[in-house]
Image (tube, helix red, strand yellow):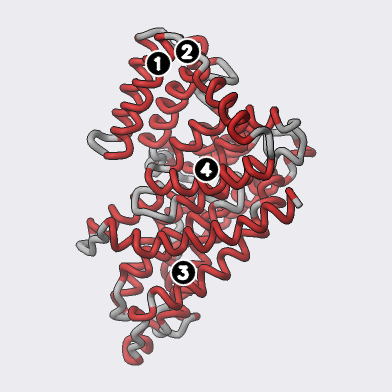
Amino acid sequence: MSVLAWLSVAVFLGAYALIATERIHRVAAALGGAGIMLAIHATDAGAAFFSEHSGVDWNVVFLLLGMMVIVGVLKRTGVFEYLAIWAAKRARGRPYRLMVLLVVITAGASALLDNVTTVLLVAPVTFLVCARLALPVVPFLIAEAMASNIGGAATLVGDPPNIIIASRGGLSFNDFLVHMAPMVVLLMIVFLGLCRVMFRKAFLYDADRAAEIMQLDEREAIADRRLLWQSLGVLGLVMAAFVLHPVLHYEPSVVAILGAGILVAATKVTTAQAIEEVEWETLVFFMGLFVMVGALVETGVIGKISQLAVQATEGRLGLTTMVLLWASAGLSAIVDNIPYVATMSPIVADLVQAGGGGEHAQVLWWALAFGADLGGNATAVGAAANVVVLGIAARHRQPISFWEFTKYGLIVTLVTVALVTPYLWLRYLA
């Protein structure tokens, strides 16, 4: 490789180390790395901002932006508070039943919305419900974070790594439903069983407090019924358009932006209110990351790694799939799965092409998606949703330590990835 290629590797690894260790804010690390890549001419403005193969993936950015605006409007209706109180009442104050309902709601919402946004909305409400039932909140928060990562794996929009994979691999919303969702349902059933064992000490039933919560009226949590129906209507249309992509031929990013625009235009929510919940830092982080990875593509680093990977596995699809699945899970446990997938996706694209590029070779995309999404559960820093939950817990003076999260996360990751292994082998490789 050239001197410029080695320099770009050094810049990328330096930025990656700063992101992983949180020495400086991850946005500053990504933007700083992108700036240096441009400064040393590892890439240029044309490639960074306009290239389909080595530039900022605007489909990812605008899909996230559109969904964040829709969720920001939906939050104003009080529907998430409604669901939490409804779950507590349906569980009749029984702690494990409550955890099951909250976890299922979190996983389901994460499949339709971004999982980071879901935990931002569900976690604060969990404090309210647990306080009323005198339950320790930490086990519930940990379970919700993990459920959001598992549930988010089911769809294209559920987890940011899936958005990157779909964009790079040319995969549709329906592809994820067909190949990922069935296994995710099984994983959620197993996860609920694990919760019963891992958090058994937290399930302390208080009959008096259970009676009190049964007196709450969840309907009072709805702040704006008209806005709720408008938001659900637009969200339903957006989901339908995702599913009908083969017929309509609209990219998910276009659908999300159209949905966000229609919702803001058709309701009394102001533009300022609609964008309050947009996580601009996350979007900018993505942009910086794409520029850095694009520089590795431009300097030939990604191509060289892909070549070495093909040689190491001798083109054997089964071996490549298993290595990719478990390596992705392991690496996503150490660093955030978003930068990991952004780095690996061009490599996997080359491996898919080397494997013939057909549907058979696309098992590599599913191995990457399952490995990254489920590996994110292993540690407190493995996924953005985990970091968000820890931040919320700290603000409520219920801190969750790195190891308190990780001792449960490692168990969940090992069990779920172990279950995915025979699924991929039997469905795609046998």
Query: Dot 4: within a 10 Å radius of its alpha carbon, few (fewer than 14), some, or many (20 or more) residues?
Result: many
Which comes sooner in the sequence, label 4 or label 3?
A: 4
Instruction: For marks 3 and 2, give the one nearer the viewer.
Output: 2
Instruction: For marks 4 and 1, give the one nearer the viewer.
Output: 1
Q: Is residue 306 left or right of residue 88?
A: right
Q: Cβ–Cβ below 8 Å for labels 2 and 1?
A: yes
At x 40%, y 25%, the residue is 288
| Residue 328 in view, yes or no | yes
Q: Secondary structure at mark 1?
A: helix
Type of residue at label 1? Trp
Type of residue at label 2? Met
C-alpha gap between disc 4 and disc 2: 41 Å
At x 37%, y 86%, the residue is 210
Question: Residue 209: horizontal and vertical position, in percent?
Answer: 32, 86
Which comes sooner in the sequence, label 3 or label 2?
A: 2
Q: Is residue 293 left or right of residue 200?
A: right
Identify residue for label 3: 102
C-alpha gap between disc 3 and disc 1: 48 Å
